[in-house]
Structures are given as C-alpha cells and as structure tokens.
Image (cartoon, rainbow, N blue to C red):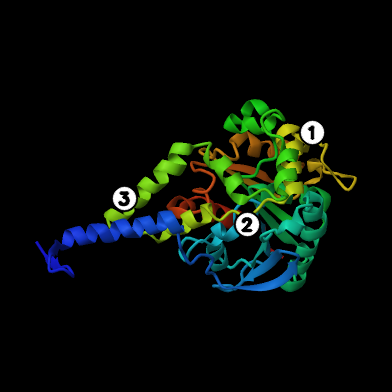
Amino acid sequence: MAQQRTSNGGVVPSEVENFFDKYSAGMRVVVEGAQADTGRTPKELVWTKNKARLYRYEPSAEKKHPVPILMVYALINRPYVLDLLPGNSFIEYLTSQGFDVYLLDWGIPGDEDKDIDFEHLILDYLPRAVKKVLRTSGADELTLLGYCMGGTMSTMYASLFPEKLKNLVLLTTPVSFPRDEMGTYSLFTSQKNLNPDLLADAFGNIPGEMVDTGNRMLKPVTNYVGTYMNMWERIFEDKPMESWLAMNKWVNDGPPFPGAAFKTWIKDFYQQDKLVKGEVKLRGRRVDLSNIKIPLLSIAGKKDHICLLPQAEATMDLVSSEDKEFFVLDAGHVGLMTGRGAKKGLWPKVSSWLETRSGA
C-alpha cells in the first residue's frame, strides 16, 4: 500500500488521501455550486433591446440552407442548454449541418423589468429580432424554433405575424392546460393553490430559485437525492464529470421571471386555458392559432413532467397547416435536448425535417 508522510511525521495511505481529495471535490460542488465552461460555440452579438440579446452563430460548415433558424428560448432557465458543451450542443450540431443559426436570449431581468409582459415580448421584441435576422442573413423568410415557453411565444407570434415565416418548430411546447391532464401541475390551475398576483406584488420579479424549486418538487427524490447520488458515484468511480457539472450549473442558474409575465402565464394559461379557447389578446389583437398555415414540427417527450404530451399535441388540432407532424421521443424535458439520446433522436430529426423545407 502506497503511503505519504504527514507534516507531523505520520503516514497516510494514498488510498485514504485519494478518498478525502474526492470528498473535498464533491463538497466544493455542494457548497459553491457547479462550475463549467458552457456555451462555447462561437457567436456574434447582432442586436440588443433592453436585456435581450440576439446572437448569430459562426458556421462550422458551408452554408447549405438559405432559410435561417431563429431560436426563441423560455423566460425560465438560461438558453445555454441549447449550446451546453462541445460535442453536446444542439446549436453546434445545426451549424455543422449547414444551417444559419440565431438565438434570442431574453437576458436577466432587473427590478426595473417587473412590468414586462407577453405583449412586450411578442409585439415589440420578437418582430424586431425577426427583422434583424432577415436583414443579417439576406433571406426573405426564416424558421422560428421555440423551446418550452419559448415555443408558446413563437406560436403566438406565428399566428399574428405569419408573413415572413417559412417553418415553425416547437420543442416541448405547451399550448393547452387542461386541469384534468396536468398531473402535479394541476396545483397551478387553481387560484386557491397559487395566487400569482400576491407573489408578483411581493417580489416584483419572481426569483429564479423559486420557479426552479416548484419544478423540482414535481419529482423531489430524482431531482434532489438522485442528482447528488449521481455526482458522488461519478467522483468516486472516476467517471467524467464535465457534462454533469454543466447540467447542474444550468439547472441552478435560473433568471428572475418578470412579474407581469408571470401573472399572465399562470392566470391566462394555467388557470384559464385561454390560448386553446382563442381568448388571448395582445393589445386588442386576438391570438388565433388557426392563422398558422406554414409547415409545423412539434416534438415532445414521453417522460416530460413539465410539458405533458396532451399539452403539446393540442397544437395539431388548432393550426391550419397541411404539412404538420407531431413527433414523440422517449425522453424527458431536458434529456430530449442534451446527451446521447438527443444526438440520436431530436437533433437529426429536426435537421432532416428542416433540410427539405429550408430551400430558397
């Protein structure tokens, strides 16, 4: 057994020292949070508005498809899950397939942004971002790709501004909020259980950790106990840690949710299911999803406990598109986007679907 002398002349077996090194490494993650260099695909900032940023990603292959892709992320969590790590990045993959990729990052709202609502995001921010993508790319039309709530916003935008849109791709996107099919999220559908006005009035913006805790409590054993059991297993069995650290960093990096948008999201969507009823209005303009006639691909996960299958599939009956497909993967809300399953499932599916629909 290898040994090492201590400062007082004693001897410590190397196995014991190795154990404490690994234990210390794990405790640093628990106490300080995971550290990882995420979002490394080269990009250029091409437009800003308030906290929002529009990025264009540098191509890693010759541009094959004239129609650019504008990715729209949610107001919850950070968009670098789309570009997690080299080799585990949806954005990196799409650029390698010859797509011209842009990302709209809503940024981190400050206290002064508590009154930002969906009207501002869909009527003010998105139209300008779309205009900048078309001007920068030189294209006449673009593909709008929305993830989670970003897909819900993209769907509303597409119903109001269909003119410059070529395709609509929705990933784990809820449009329907039926109380009897919401599972644990049915708690959100009752004003008795959740009064968003009280929360927004108390906090202004809803703290990211509060939103994240609500999501994680849907599967508390998996999300709290299981996560750190997996970490300790990786450390003590000398397994690669980079992907775990990147995902853990992302999960705990939620930005504040603008108070006004939070109130609308809970009341108009979860509690009153207005989108499927055609009752959502933005500055007097009714959002009618039957106005959507462009090709549509909607992808959902069987194991997704945040956007359940009925919530995503409802889009199929609401739009007027003749070219539309609902594709289900055996994955969860995040696993659908990252990791080995995503490389074999979601990434090639989106790429192959768009290849035939992204010509001039």
Horizontally, residue 41 falls left or right of residue 271, namely left
Query: x and y percent of residue 316 in the render?
Result: 69, 38
Say which residue label 2 marks: 354
Horizontally, residue 246 falls left or right of residue 271, namely left
Q: Residues within 10 Å of mark 1 (few under 14, many from 20)?
A: few
Q: Quadrant of residue 182?
A: top right
Q: Closer to the camera: disc 3 or disc 2?
A: 3
Residue positioned 62% across, 55% down in the render: 255
Horizontally, residue 194 falls left or right of residue 120, namely left
Up the image or down, 280 lies above or below 7; here it is: above
Up the image or down, 162 lies above or below 102; here it is: above
Q: Quadrant of the N terminus?
A: bottom left
Secondary structure beneath dot 3 equals helix
Up the image or down, 349 lies above or below 3; here it is: above
Query: x and y percent of residue 140 in the render?
Result: 78, 66
Q: How many marks?
A: 3
Residue that sits furthest to the front in the current view: 8
Q: Residues within 10 Å of mark 2 (few under 14, many from 20)?
A: many
Amino acid on which the number 2 mark rests in the picture: Leu
Query: x and y percent of residue 44 in the render?
Result: 64, 74
Report the Cα–Cα distance between label 1 and label 3.
48 Å
Give whichever of 303, 212 is nearer the camera: 212
Say which residue label 1 marks: 277
Say which residue label 3 marks: 233
Give whichever of 47, 322 is nearer the camera: 47
Residue positioned 39% across, 48% down in the render: 228
